[in-house]
Image: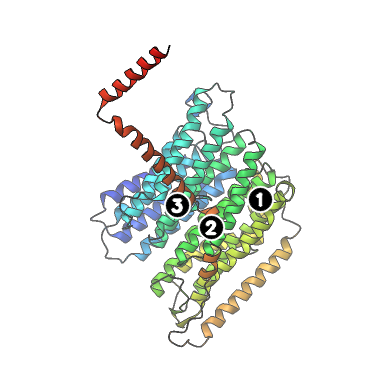
């Protein structure tokens, strides 16, 4: 019941925002949209548990037709994190708008529809006839949101996320149609499953399709974070995490290739973050790195890896929206988030502390909940793919280094400012539960992880829990003293550049980025297909609009063959 009410509330609120798009006050519409998303979050969290499976309305082959139902306890925390990220993002957008501004209702309407699509994709079975519908709805609403935010695209060029969405819908529809046409006990061909997984990777903007995220770099930080950082990754990665346990294990070769794509893609995304030129681009690359980890964990047929996939997937939407909040605060106070080595005019020590926790969350350092996902994945790789551990460690170190320029931009400036704004407050509210769950991971066990089909008898986190508490407290105290030092540091001389950037190193080592962003390879393939098509057109142009000539040549060939006989 809570899920149904949440879906209806999101769609009804979207319709209301569309109707008031030219007459309503922007802030009020944003607050109304945030209220609808918040009520949907509460409805999903408090929805009664249904232990018995829902009876399908109709079954075609092996595909049941079921209506949206209550989210399983093993997935409920992830769905709540997605909706909570949407609520916080909408609330921050509403508070950013001036009180007297009119319009932009279409923006909030599209964002609400995208959240409804994400919720729908998690409340139905992954192999459902509604799955392609939810994907189409998500891609269209994301595109509408970016257009409503005055996003400009190159003429005669489709955004990458639109192309990826079309490929994903076709791939998922192929798998579902194949299973619907087969008898109930027949399993789909592994090739069809792999194609559907590739489509989901493209939809999520996961390696090697992380370049689809960069098409939203020009959008406002929070809008880009909500669309290609929260909605699309949660749908695509959620499909992969949920579908693989329901199907027979992939062949060893396919599993190894998928795990390698995730591992090396995470390393490539870390190098992409290293060469970032803006804060929002850095946040997108960090999200792609985490998506690679989820792909790697999902590909390994190991219970601990399955537990790691769920733990890491929970962090992705929360990281995206908090990163968007930090970049929005930097833009509001410093007018730009460019990472070019020049010091900012304004110091933002509290925002810097938030960014430090966000970067540690993205790279798996022992500050927040993501540390346990990295640890469980590493333990699973020891027995399955030991060679993948060094690339993951390198990705964590490089990703941490890539976050330092934005941290120094916050901490070093020529003047201070009162930065206790809504971005900082909302960021603390989101990061606090992650830090608490990282310090005391057993708090998440009875409410969430213990219900996972991969859950061991006890939470595999007790042996180092208390030393981890001390390490987290030490990092927190050290960050606080560094922030205080940044506040009390003397002003910098005009024009003095003190912020280190790694763009030079990132360009020298740019080839690993191609693993995470295969746009160059896909472009070369596209050019090759164009050349083949040109050759075929040249060969056929002789007969274009001259069908009689083609007939004469065929007749002559036939006569020659008869004469030869």
Residue plotted at (44% across, 35% down):
130
Q: Which mark is residue 156?
A: none
Question: Would residue 16 be seen by someone viewing this image from the given angle?
Answer: yes
Q: Which residue is mark 1?
A: 445
Residue at 40% x, 71% y is 336
- Describe the element under mark 3 as helix, strand or loop: helix
Q: Which mark is residue 513?
A: 2
Residue at image x 53%, y 81%? 486
If you read the primary sequence from the N terminus, does the residue marked by circle 3 or circle 1 appear first? Answer: 3
Distance between the alpha carbons at the discs numbered 3 and 2: 13 Å
Report if the CB atoms under discs 1 and 2 are less than 8 Å apart.
no
- Is 185 located above or below residue 304 in the figure? above
The image position of residue 2, as x and y in percent, is 47, 42
Q: Which mark is residue 212?
A: 3
Q: Residues within 10 Å of mark 1 (few under 14, many from 20)?
A: some
Above or below, 515 relative to 439:
above
């Amino acid at each position: 019941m809570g899920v149904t009410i949440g879906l209806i509330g999101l769609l009804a609120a979207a319709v209301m925002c569309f109707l008031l798009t030219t007459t309503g006050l922007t802030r009020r519409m944003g607050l109304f949209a945030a209220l609808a998303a918040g009520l949907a979050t509460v409805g999903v969290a408090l929805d009664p548990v249904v232990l018995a499976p829902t009876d399908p309305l109709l079954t075609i082959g092996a595909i049941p037709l079921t209506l949206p139902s209550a989210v399983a306890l093993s997935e409920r925390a992830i769905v709540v994190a997605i909706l909570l990220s949407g609520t916080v993002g909408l609330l921050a957008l509403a508070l950013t708008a001036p009180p007297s501004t009119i319009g932009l209702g279409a923006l909030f309407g599209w964002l609400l529809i995208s959240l409804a699509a994400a919720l729908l994709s998690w409340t139905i079975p992954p192999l459902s006839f509604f799955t392609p519908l939810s994907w189409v709805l998500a891609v269209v609403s994301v595109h509408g949101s970016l257009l409503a935010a005055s996003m400009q695209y190159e003429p005669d060029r489709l955004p990458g996320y639109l192309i990826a969405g079309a490929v994903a819908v076709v791939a998922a529809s192929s798998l579902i149609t194949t299973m619907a046409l087969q008898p109930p006990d027949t399993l789909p061909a592994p090739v069809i499953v792999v194609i559907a997984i590739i489509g989901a990777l493209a939809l999520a903007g996961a390696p090697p399709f992380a370049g689809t995220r960069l098409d939203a770099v020009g959008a406002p930080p929070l809008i880009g974070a909500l669309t290609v950082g929260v909605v699309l990754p949660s749908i695509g990665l959620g499909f992969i995490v949920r579908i693989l346990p329901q199907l027979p294990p992939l062949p060893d070769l396919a599993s190894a290739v998928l795990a390698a794509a995730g591992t090396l893609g995470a390393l490539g995304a870390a190098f992409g973050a290293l060469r970032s030129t803006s804060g929002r681009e850095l946040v997108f690359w960090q999200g792609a790195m985490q998506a690679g980890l989820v792909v790697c964990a999902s590909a390994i047929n190991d219970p601990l890896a399955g537990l790691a996939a769920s733990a890491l997937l929970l962090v992705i939407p929360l990281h995206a929206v908090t990163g968007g909040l930090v970049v929005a605060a930097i833009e509001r106070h410093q007018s730009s988030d460019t990472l070019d080595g020049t010091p900012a005019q304004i110091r933002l020590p509290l925002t810097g502390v938030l960014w430090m926790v966000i970067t540690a969350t993205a790279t798996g350092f022992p500050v927040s909940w993501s540390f346990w996902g990295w640890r469980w994945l590493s333990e699973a790789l020891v027995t399955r793919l030991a060679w993948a551990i060094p690339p993951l460690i390198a990705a964590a170190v490089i990703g941490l280094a890539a976050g330092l320029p934005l941290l120094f931009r916050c901490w070093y400036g020529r003047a201070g400012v009162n930065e206790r704004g809504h971005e900082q407050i909302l960021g603390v509210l989101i990061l606090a539960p992650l830090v608490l769950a990282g310090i005391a991971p057993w708090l998440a066990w009875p409410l969430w992880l213990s219900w996972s089909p991969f859950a061991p008898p006890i939470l595999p986190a007790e042996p180092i829990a208390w030393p981890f508490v001390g390490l987290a407290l030490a990092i927190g105290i050290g960050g606080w003293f560094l922030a205080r030092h940044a506040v009390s540091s003397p002003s910098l001389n005009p024009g003095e550049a003190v912020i280190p950037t790694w763009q030079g190193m990132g360009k020298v080592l740019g080839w690993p980025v191609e693993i995470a962003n295969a746009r160059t390879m896909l472009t070369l393939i596209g050019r090759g297909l164009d050349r083949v098509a040109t050759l075929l057109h040249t060969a056929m142009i002789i007969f274009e609009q001259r069908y009689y000539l083609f007939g004469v040549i065929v007749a002559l060939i036939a006569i020659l063959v008869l004469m030869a006989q």
